[in-house]
Amino acid sequence: MNAMVSIAGRPEISHAEMANALRFLAVDAVEKAKSGHPGMPMGMADVATVLFSRFLKFDPADPAWPDRDRFVLSAGHGSMLLYALLHLTGYEGVTLDQLKAFRQWGSKTPGHPEHGHTPGVETTTGPLGQGIATAVGMALAERMMNARFGDDLVNHFTYVIAGDGCLMEGISHEAISLAGHLRLNRLIVLFDDNQISIDGATSLSCSDDQLARFRASGWSAVRIDGHDPHAIASAIEAARNSDRPTLIACRTVIGFGAPNRQGSEKVHGAPLGAEETENTRRALNWPYSAFEIPNEILVRWREAAEAGRKARQAWLERTRRLCGAGRSPFHDALNKKLPCTYAEAMKQLCLKFAADKRKLATRQASQQVLDAIAGALPNLLGGSADLTHSNLTLAKTQTPVRRDAMDGNYIHYGVREHAMAAAMNGIALHGGFIPYGGTFLAFADYSRPSIRLAALMGIRVIHVMTHDSIGLGEDGPTHQPVEHLAALRAIPNLLVFRPADAVETAEAWDCALRAETSPSILCLSRQALPAFRDADDSGNRVARGAYVVIEPKGARDVTLIATGSEVSVALDAARLLGEKGVRAAVVSAPCFDLFRTQSNDYRAKVLGNAPRVGVEAAVEGDWARWLGDDGEFVGMTGFGASAPAETLYREFGITAEALVAAAERAVSRARNSNLVSAN
Ligand SMILES: Cc1ncc(C[n+]2csc(CCOP(=O)(O)OP(=O)(O)O)c2C)c(N)n1
């Protein structure tokens, strides 16, 4: 603890003083907020001090500098550790006043770190396990960018602080397994090995030998004294030179320095209280008042960023030399905008789909989209959780990413949906790629926590989720999503697309690729669907969320609204109704989320004044919003069953005939109520 940090001609600042600055900012902020987690920052202050002052490459002047090291606080409840680091190293906006406003409305210092809200926060953490799994994506993206552009432009590490909780979460297993398989040797996890979680000692619930566990997944792993700066530094040094990812289990004392609380769960998530705070000040020999950081210590912390500042200047110089002043493939990769060659490829494909009018499963249409655009989008990065040939996510030109082939552009994630979704978040956050990955829609639940974080962070990640209804048939109810559309539509800022034919599939892809601040889910059919869209120049119709496919001559008697595979059911029903003299409009609604954002006028025009009937091979969810009180919904009311798709549609009553009957009921109800009100 007595290592000195000497700067010629100035008072020597000890490691302990720097670490204590972190500790007390955390203690004081939690104390002032009357809530928060002081234990973890106090325990990991030594590790964080060594990392930030001796290794981490960062420049607070440009928190988004592409070649910075990434630091992920996977144990997000210890957010005050990160905020204290950002403040002390000089990130603009993370002021002392912001630390004093910890966890308050409008502050830059929310309860858990939020990417996009606080400069220097690389990813949103709090749900344990997500950070470490996201970091795997970042470390993978770094190696892949390095393979494309070389050491001069891309050469950085991804550091993670993770706690017992992160390592207990199942997602961590998938993530470390993937990282070990791919030999992501730029990934270094600093494990806060304090043997305490909320309920008490971790021995209450966990007996894992974490070192053996990581080694079994192909990692290097060591255990050190997490309060010994020399041990911390040499472990990090060794990890940086390892040919595989490294776990450094840092044996620490939670709440280090609080005489009556340290080492106990009591210090995990509650303020120390005035008395214990004073005890801690005495115990750690920190005679300063709340939030007071002596200037010499602050100066020394600010100097920790100096090496990174120089590294960034040198990088900028190299970039100018290697890439020139204008656009370069490197800049193109980092640019979120799509190249114009892409738009042309997409346009030609839509024309071809409209001309062919072939019956295609939307997953097949999606495959054709990928084949058509992959060449024009060099930063498109595909993948699937071991369902490549079902999801049809591999474009003809794509090659697998392997530990010895980081220049590939298709990731075989293995049967790891949790890790795939989190890694895609990390890849998107890192920059340089547009990640998409496939699985079955019924398994969206395995990816959901990461999808939710992607939506919260506002990042472009595309999930290709095929086999989107009972239409998948014989695999039965385990594989047939019924509640998933409703559940996914409930996540704010997530675009859920359910295209109905090949043109709509291409348009949905186009929307997802252009959505720079939203993740998307493409829900695609296993079964073939008739094509109904013509080539027209009215632009991307899916982008409006819903639109009129058929407008009857004369006033509408009824509006049929459908998504995906059920649009063709609605088209058949409209024809049958027409034969009976009932004028039915058909609306395709591939994306409720986008429809909700249209003008009132547009929505009113699409929905019309006639009674509405909705059809979707799923549970009703929030359909009522579009159908109104007089509407009717034709869909699923429970789980599916194992049988051929046509049988299932018939047995569950999702047919044109059922839709006709529902429409007739709705029309007659509306007529009766008109009569009543006229009388
Ligand atoms: C997915 C998830 N489950 C539960 C929680 C609630 N939680 C926050 S911290 C914590 C205990 C974590 O223990 P550890 O990682 O050892 O942290 P420490 O006690 O060392 O600070 C729990 C259960 C959470 N944030 N995320």
Image: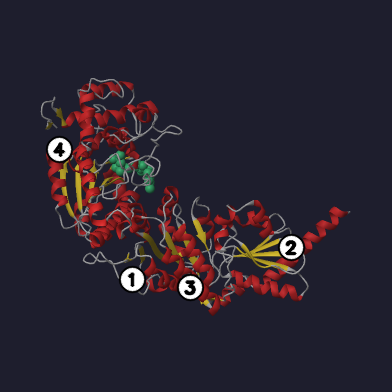
Q: Nearer the viewer, mark 4 or mark 1?
A: 1
Q: Amino acid at mark 2?
A: Ala
- Quadrant in the rendering for residue 451: bottom left
Q: Amino acid at mark 3?
A: Leu
Would you name the residue on which mark 4 appears? 229
Spot occupied by residue 533 in the image (x, y as percentages of width and height): 58, 72
The total number of labels drawn is: 4
* First along the sequence among labels 1 and 2: 1
Mark 1 and mark 2: span between their CA atoms? 50 Å
Assess whether mark 4 and mark 2 are in contact (beta carbons under 8 angstroms): no
Q: Left of 584 or right of it: where is 407?
A: left
What quarter of the picture does the C terminus occupy? Answer: bottom right
Would you name the residue on which mark 2 appears? 666
Q: Vertical placement of 200 versus 17: above or below?
A: below
Q: Nearer the viewer, mark 1 or mark 2?
A: 1
* First along the sequence among labels 4 and 1: 4
Q: Left of 293 or right of it: where is 3?
A: left
Would you name the residue on which mark 1 appears? 398
What quarter of the picture does the N terminus occupy? Answer: top left
Mark 4 and mark 1: span between their CA atoms? 46 Å
Q: Vertical placement of 111 versus 485: above or below?
A: above
Mark 2 and mark 3: span between their CA atoms? 39 Å
Q: Amino acid at mark 4?
A: Pro
